[in-house]
Image: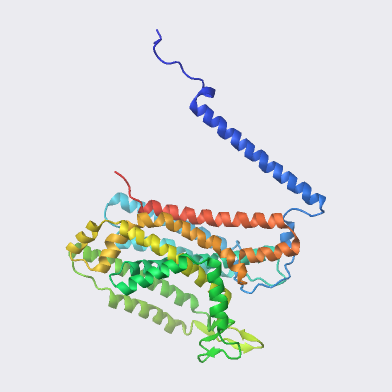
């Protein structure tokens, strides 16, 4: 016999969950209706004004020059094999790591770590060497298509973003440690560095570095020339460019193997110190490996690189490699501006670690650099990483200000294409989609790292 005192079952359409689903479905339907209406309205207006729509214009010839050109590898042949081997190597490394953790709770042994490095680094490099002949790298010219022009601008943007993120983090860490220094003068200087750069607009700082600093360098005819090894003028910094020869692959492989060996030596020395208290030998074996192995490869292969020196031809230097003033001003401006915010984030993360942790580390006779590196910073990362993600996103999005100083980034190149083709809707849509993807990738990577350093509750 059913219990009459039990509450009656509420119908789904009257329940709280049912109402929530109903409201969300209505909101989603309204959003889709609005998007479709805007799309149809846009197509109708474009047709009324005689403007063609679609992305077919991307195959047209660009017909304009780009000041800074980055090679674009085609996603075919050797590039696909390299990406496949990279994914396979990372997957094998992850499997090895999980297998070792199941076998023992101790940190990964040196032999297993060497196997992971061989899979994640060695396998892709060997694959790239084997399929190098099928790798095609395109360089933009005025006869190239709009697609390659946009790809070149995107490569320039990504280059600035990566360098800016790394440089602003390192500089921000140095300024944060300076602010926490017991030295009164150093602490005050770092404080004023933070306050000054945080409260000046980024665009103003870009103008300062480009027009006030770099444009005051001498003209091309009066360049600062150090025997052809370094040439500096208002057109940029020019250096000799290494040209790979037949033995370049062997030399580069020797350098990579030497760096991996140094990493293993340092890790083994640290583990030996933790287990026995005796510091392991690090300096001499590392120097011997870093100098000896590449030096041996150099002797065996002969001269793996030839140098292409810059030479004055016409109104500028040709050959070699260099840094343009637009690229330098953009990187320096972004680095200095964002490093001020990063410094405060890092300082707050360090100060969030309780003083008892430092005192306990000092009681174990640890040096100050060991206290900061081993005890404080690993705990501070839990506080530092989330807000630091916002600063990395700011670097990616603020790089679009490069158009103000003439650096050919993604927005600048897209603006030129927009002026030539008149395809405003498509170009703006490409801008939005690309910057959205960049931001999502940065957030995805930082979220993964944040999950690794986050405090796991028991």
Picture residue at 73% right of the left edge, 53% below the top: 54
Do we see residue 5 in this rendering? Answer: yes
Picture residue at 35% right of the left edge, 71% below the top: 188
- Image coordinates of residue 363 in percent, x first then y, are 17, 62
| In the image, residue 207 above or below residue 345 | below
Picture residue at 29% right of the left edge, 60% below the top: 376
| In the image, residue 113 above or below residue 309 | above
In the picture, which quadrant includes the N terminus? Answer: top left
The colour scheme used here is: rainbow
- Image coordinates of residue 242 in percent, x first then y, are 52, 81
In the picture, which quadrant includes the C terminus? Answer: top left
Q: Report the side of 457 relative to 144 (left or right).
A: left
- Image coordinates of residue 52 in percent, x first then y, are 78, 54
Q: Nearer the viewer, residue 179 or 365?
A: 179
Q: Report the side of 147 relative to 121 (left or right).
A: right
Do we see residue 131 in this rendering? Answer: no
Where, by quadrant of the figure, is residue 446 drawn? bottom left
Callout count: 0
Q: Nearer the viewer, residue 125 or 67?
A: 67
Q: Report the side of 180 relative to 132 (left or right).
A: left
Where, by quadrant of the figure, is residue 181 drawn? bottom left
- Image coordinates of residue 48 in percent, x first then y, are 82, 50
Q: Nearer the viewer, residue 268 or 81?
A: 268
Q: Nearer the viewer, residue 53 or 335?
A: 335
């Amino acid at each position: 016999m059913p219990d009459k005192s039990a509450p009656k079952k509420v119908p789904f359409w009257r329940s709280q969950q049912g109402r929530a689903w109903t409201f969300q479905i209505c909101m989603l339907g309204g959003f889709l209706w609005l998007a479709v209406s805007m799309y149809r309205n846009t197509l109708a207006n474009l047709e009324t004004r005689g403007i063609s729509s679609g992305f077919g214009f991307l195959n047209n010839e660009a017909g304009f020059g780009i000041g800074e050109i980055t090679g674009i590898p085609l996603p075919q042949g050797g590039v696909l094999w390299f990406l496949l081997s990279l994914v396979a190597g990372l997957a094998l490394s992850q499997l090895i790591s999980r297998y070792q953790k199941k076998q023992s709770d101790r940190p990964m042994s040196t032999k297993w770590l060497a196997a992971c490095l061989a899979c994640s680094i060695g396998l892709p490099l060997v694959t790239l060497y084997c399929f190098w002949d099928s790798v095609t790298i395109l360089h933009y010219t005025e006869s190239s298509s709009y697609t390659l022009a946009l790809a070149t601008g995107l490569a320039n943007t990504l280059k600035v973003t990566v360098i800016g993120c790394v440089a602003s983090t390192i500089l921000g860490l140095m300024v944060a440690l300076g602010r926490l220094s017991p030295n009164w003068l150093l602490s005050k200087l770092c404080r004023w560095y933070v306050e000054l750069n945080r409260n000046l607009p980024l665009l103003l700082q870009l103008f300062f570095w480009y027009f006030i600093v770099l444009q005051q360098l001498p003209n091309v005819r009066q360049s600062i020339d150090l025997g052809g090894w370094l040439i500096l003028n208002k057109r940029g910094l020019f250096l000799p460019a290494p040209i790979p020869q037949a033995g370049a692959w062997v030399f580069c492989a020797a350098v990579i193997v030497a760096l991996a060996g140094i990493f293993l030596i340092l890790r083994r020395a640290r583990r030996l110190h933790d287990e026995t208290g005796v510091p392991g030998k690090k300096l001499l074996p590392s120097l011997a490996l870093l100098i000896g192995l590449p030096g041996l490869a150099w002797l065996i292969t002969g001269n793996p690189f030839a140098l292409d020196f810059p030479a004055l031809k016409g109104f500028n230097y040709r050959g070699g490699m260099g840094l343009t003033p637009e690229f330098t001003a953009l990187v320096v401006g972004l680095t200095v501006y964002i490093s001020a915010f990063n410094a405060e984030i890092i300082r707050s993360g360090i100060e969030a670690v309780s003083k008892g942790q430092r005192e306990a580390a000092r009681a174990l006779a640890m040096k100050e650099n060991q206290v900061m590196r081993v005890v404080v910073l690993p705990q501070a990362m839990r506080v530092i990483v989330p807000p630091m993600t916002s600063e990395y996103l700011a670097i990616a999005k603020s790089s679009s200000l490069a158009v103000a100083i003439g650096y050919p980034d993604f927005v600048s190149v897209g603006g030129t294409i927009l002026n030539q083709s008149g395809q405003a809707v498509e170009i703006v849509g490409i801008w939005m989609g690309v910057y959205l993807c960049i931001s999502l990738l940065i957030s995805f990577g930082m979220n993964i790292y944040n999950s690794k350093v986050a405090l796991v509750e028991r």
